[in-house]
Image: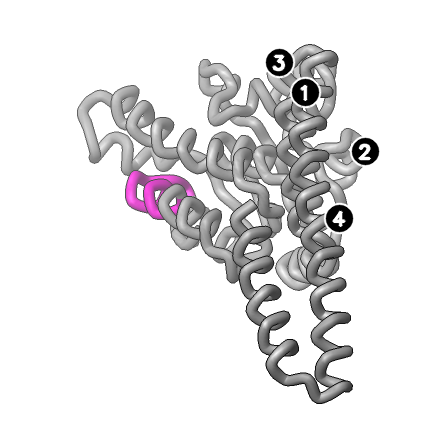
Amino acid sequence: MNRPETYNAFNLQMITELAELLMQLATDNSVKGIIVTGQGKAFCAGGDLKWAIEFSENAGSSFHTLASQLHLAIVEIRRMRKPVAAAINGTAAGAGFSLALTCDFRIMEQSAILRQAYTSNGLCINGGGTFTLPRIVGLARSLEIAAFDDPISSKQALDWGLVNKIVEDGTVLEETENMLNRLTKKSSYSFGLSKNCLLTHLTIHLSHTWNWKEKDFQTVQIILTGRKVLRHLLKNADQYLKRKNLDSAKDVVNEIRYAIVFFKGA
């Protein structure tokens, strides 16, 4: 997010660009993980009130327009099977608070502050916050945050489970990159599957989760079978090459190509 002069407050252009970028990154196979952060001193201060007044005589209409795009961004983060981390480099308030909670991981600088900010302005927590907040900290703590809207320090955020890690000021981007680099060395398929199952199973009955897992295990079985087939074919090709039986080796190479196409499609 790159509107440092407004503490990265959302106007329509910025939130639309964020939503569109997330959609592009979700389908880009060269991208293994995503970091959301803000330029300058803040992560995101929420909706831009000045922009809202200039955009429409009815500020409520302006924020409704903003919210529709914010929700697209939030849904995209939740449904994509790639890790998304919030590098909280400063204040995350209002919609910025909700956006941070949506991310899979949150790394927070020591001096940064979290604040839901909605209820102090006579509003209900928006941007998916009423979904994510109680699932992260529980109902009682969520009601406390909603009722009093006190600023939440990094230490308190860590104690409450709102963030995964606190880092020294000025190092949050580097630390978040290091964490994602560690994660992307592991199986991206496994992470995506786990993320999808955990988020989906929050809202369905226990017995339904077994049906999901059965489908997932079938997919894993196809992948494992594909690996066994390819190992067998490669072993055969190696034996033919050692015997200098080039015609047979070429036939096996063609079989390997067909197998790769088949199992990739599966």
Indicate which disc, 2 or 3, sits on the residue closer to the N terminus. 3
Indicate which disc, 4 or 1, sits on the residue closer to the N terminus. 4
Residue 102, how many percent across, how many down?
A: 57, 34
Per the model, the C-alpha gap separating discs 4 and 1 is 38 Å
Which residue corresponds to mark 3?
A: 147
Q: Nearer the viewer, mark 4 or mark 1?
A: 1
Which residue corresponds to mark 4?
A: 166
Question: Which amino acid type is marked by label 3?
Answer: Ala
Per the model, the C-alpha gap separating discs 1 and 2 is 35 Å
Per the model, the C-alpha gap separating discs 2 and 3 is 19 Å
Name the residue: 68% across, 15% down.
208
Secondary element under disc 3, as helix, strand or loop, is helix
Q: Quadrant of residue 55?
A: top left
Secondary element under disc 4, as helix, strand or loop, is strand
Question: Which amino acid type is marked by label 2?
Answer: Asp
Chain part drawn in magenta: 9-18
Name the residue: 61% across, 65% down.
256
Which residue corresponds to mark 1?
A: 211
Q: Quadrant of residue 209?
A: top right
Which residue corresponds to mark 2?
A: 159
Foreground residue, 263 or 33? Answer: 263
Quarter the C terminus occupies: top right
Q: Nearer the viewer, mark 3 or mark 1?
A: 1
